[in-house]
Image (cartoon, helix red, strand yellow):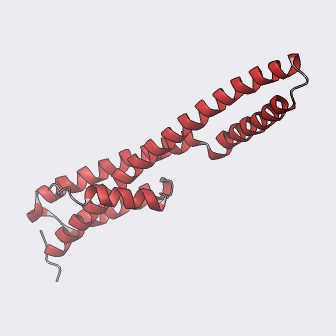
Amino acid sequence: MVEGLGGPDHVEILERWARGLQMLHVAHNIASERFNYWNRVTGISTAMLSAVVGTTLFASLSASGLIGVRVAAGASSLLTAALSAGQLVWNYPELASRHRAAAVRYATLRRQVERRLANRDQVTETDVDVTSTEWEEIEQSAPQLPIGVRRRAKKEISSIPLRG
């Protein structure tokens, strides 16, 4: 049953949403960190392989009789090209940035909900409506979270008490 001011249903809704917003905030931070990590891994791997390919090609030209060196140079060259193309396709820096922006927006909305919950007896249907509208706006621009990231975020926040 919904009451006027401070109706228990409004407070309960905001409490559930605060936990959901906390999970999304943490999950998007995890995703941002993960994509930054993979950007570094692919970038460093590509740079190292490029150096190896250049050195190997120089060595194979001076010792043209070594077929194994040529095969290794060719394989390294193909792997370097694949990693370089992957960096363009995967676009880890943009993904990391979009997840970071979503995390900030979810954190801001979560803090607003926690402030509303601090005055439980004054929570109204308008507070629920405003929160719902803001959440929908964030969801429209937020990138999709990988399932593993959601699981990890839920695990991380399961032991953290909700403020408010």
Q: Quadrant of the N terminus?
A: bottom left
Q: Which residue occupies 90% across, 22% down?
A: 64
Q: Quadrant of residue 58?
A: top right
x and y percent of residue 70 in the render? Answer: 84, 30
Q: Which residue occupies 12% across, 69% down?
A: 6
Look at the picture and state if 110 lies above or below 46: below
Return the residue found at the far left. Answer: 121
Look at the picture and state if 121 lies above or below 108: below
Q: Which residue occupies 62% across, 33% down?
A: 45
x and y percent of residue 121 in the render? Answer: 8, 64
Q: Which residue occupies 34% across, 64% down?
A: 132
The residue nearer to you, when weighing 10 against 91, is 91
Look at the picture and state if 32 lies above or below 128: above
State whether residue 126 appears in this view. no
In this rendering, position of residue 105 left or right of residue 77: left
State whether residue 102 appears in this view. yes
Q: Quadrant of the C terminus?
A: bottom left
